Structure formats: structure tokens, C-alpha cells
Image (cartoon, grey):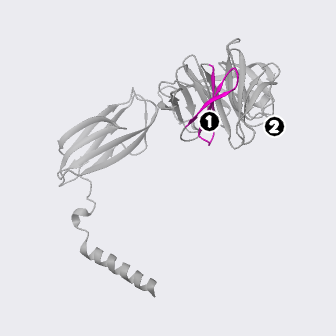
Amino acid sequence: MRLFFALFALTAVLFTSCEESPVTPKQQRKKAPFTVSNPSDNAQLVVGDQLEIRTNVVDGQELKQLQLFLGDSLLNEQKNVGIQAKYSLATKDLNVGFHTIRIVGTDAEGEEFIVNRTIALFSDIYPELKVAKIMRTYPHQTTSYTQGLEMYNGKLYEGTGQTGKSKLMEIRLETGETIRSVDVPDYIFGEGITILNDEIFQITWEARKCFVYDVNSFELKREFQYFGEGWGIANDGKHLIMSNGSSEVVFRDPKTFDIVRSIQIFGSNQEYRAINELEYLNGFIYANVYQEDYVLKIDPANGKVLEKIDCGDVVREGKGSGDVLNGIAYNTKTGNFILTGKNWSKLFEVQFVNP
């Protein structure tokens, strides 16, 4: 009975509240005083195209102010717009990838209305086709689920994955035997590695941790926490370069692990997702694409794919009963790349040449 009276009382209060506070026309959402005729959402362009942004004022409405933004950057501002507003955006200096155009209109009463449009900007460069030519093979441990491969001061290092099996190892290239290793905590799935200033950075898949080791002792020096997944990592001598399984690659401060900037990886007609293991050489990023038999050469300034390297011969000879292609290192002694895959029995020293 008490519950009945309590519910009755609550209902009465809510009913009274609704009666005393009716929704007035002013509280109802007003219709936007403008429409956007161009671009359409998810419009596709190529770097160098001119993007025309057109807005039309709705009949009987007044548009006191119109602002155009690219991301958070103000492109243009107009006052007391008449029938139509136009703005032409040059894309020649923009990075490839997805961009958000934000149109903010203010009516006569000072209320703001926002319309967003997403555009996809593809590269103006058609990737050059190369092939990976096998120069030499080395043994590789089939127990190693390769996630990261790196040569540093003439020594080969490998980071492996799988929960409960992840390791960081120094490997003797000629024999494939382990010189030394350290286990990653059992609950963590290890991912890519890179070495900068005598420190090994090993990221993790879903644990959101980066372990930093001394390259000479393998002693754990510190850890970083980050948001999202970790897949591959490299460095350009100044920044750490990291992938997360999407088309995005971020550049991080090695002292703080803070993101400095990011790029998206796009070719002339596609977005490249599942960017995985990374290597940086002579001003370019080289990247595995997960479950694909090729490596991409990428411009780190803008995300454009410059070369697509067919590694089909490497995969056919190396995969066997193993998993996918993964692992890129560069041998400064020979001037060749080293490729392998997850649980493969071989490492391949290769050159990227014309077909």
C-alpha cells in the first residue's frame, strides 16, 4: 500500500510539473535558415581539386553570419548573407584522408545551426609497382608470432605476440637462435618494436601499454599508457611512428608518448586500413598491411602511398604452415630489407625492384 501511495504521489508531481511548464514554440527546435548544396556528404576528391562549398538561404529566413571550418580551422566568415554563399577551397596542400567541413550559420536571433560534411581526399600520385626480390634466406623460429622486427647496430631484435607467449628477443640472424629474451607479462599481447637512442619501445595490442627497455641489458626502464590499440611502431630519429590497425599513423614524442601529429594512409583510389608493422628508412615509412601480401612505401609528410611492393614470392616460399606476412627490418650492412611472417620458418633478405 505504501508503494502505491508513493507511486501515486510521484505521478501527481510529474503531472503537475508538466502542467506548469508547457513546451513553448520558442523551445522547439527551429528549422535551419540555410541548406548546403555542395559538397555532398562523403564526397570524393583528389589532391589538387578545387572544392566548391555552396550554401543557400531558406526563403523568408535571415542568415546573420556564416562561418566555414576545415576541422577546427576557420576558412571563411561572411556577414548578412543574401540568397547564396560560395567559397572555393584549394586542396593541393591538404593531406590525403578524411576531412570534416563544418558550416556554422547564425540566424537573426543569434541561434547557431551546424551542418557537417565529410570529404575523402585521395592521392594525386599513382603508386609505383615494385616486387620483393629474394637475395638470401635465414632460419626463423616457428614459435615466434612476429609482431616487430628491427636491426640496430648490426644486431637483430624481434618482438612477438600471443597472450602468454609474447617476448622481446635478440636473435642471431645467421642461425635464428635466441641470444637473450625477456617475457612480456602473461596477460599482455605484445606488438611492434622500435629502437631509439639505445632504448627499445615495445607496444601492446589491447593493454594500452608501451614498455621501454635498455637495449644493452633488456632492463625495463619505464612504461607509457596510451589510448586505443597498438599494432606497429618505428621511429624517424626524432618521433615514434605508430599504427593502430586503421589507416591512421600517429607521430609521438618519445619522452612523453604524447601524439604530435597524425596522417592517414591513402592511395590514388583507396584508403589503406589495417596498417601494421612499420619501418622508417631515408625519409619514408614502409608498412605491412595486415593479411595482405604487399608492403607500402609512404610519404610521412602527407600519408600518400608512393610505392606498392608485391611480396607474393616471399609469402609463397615462407608461409608454409605459418600465418601472414609481418615483420620489416633494414640491414645497413647489405642495404637490403629483411621480411618474415608470423610463425614462419624463414627470414628473407630482399631488394625492392622493378617487376
Question: How dense is the environment of label 1, judged by Cα within 10 Å: few (below 14), some, or many (20 and up)?
Answer: many
Q: Residue at x 71, y 15 (%)?
A: 154
Quarter of the C terminus within the rendering? top right
Element type at mark 2:
loop
Residue 20 in percent (x, y) is at 24, 74
Q: Quadrant of residue 296?
A: top right
Residue 342 appears in the picture as rendered: yes
Please, what is the three-letter code of the amino acid marked with disc 1? Trp
Where residue 11 appears, x then y in whole percent?
Answer: 36, 79
- Magenta residue span: 198-225
Marks 1 and 2 in Cβ contact (< 8 Å): no
Residue 291 in view (yes/no): no
How far apart marks 1 and 2 lie (CA) works out to 23 Å
The label nearer to you, 1 versus 2, is 1
Q: Of residues 272 and 240, which is closer to you in this image?
A: 240
Residue bearing the label numbered 2: 321
Amino acid bearing label 2: Ser
Check if residue 119 falls in the magenta segment: no
Considering the numbered disc 1 on the image, is that residue within a helix, a strand or a loop?
loop
Q: Is residue 205 in the magenta section?
A: yes
Instruction: Pinpoint residue 91: horizontal percent, then vertical percent.
Output: 38, 30
| Residue 247 marker | none
Whether residue 17 is situated above or below residue 234 in the rendered picture: below
| Residue in view at x 77 percent, y 23 percent | 171
- Pointer 1 or 2: first along the chain: 1
**Residue receiving disc 1:** 231
Q: Is residue 204 above or below residue 254?
A: below
Q: Would you call the spot at circle 2 few (<14 residues within 10 Å), some (14-19), or many (20 or more)? A: few
Determine whether, in the image, residue 169 is placed left or right of residue 70: right
Going by the image, does 51 lie left or right of 301? left
Residue 222 appears in which quarter of the rendering? top right
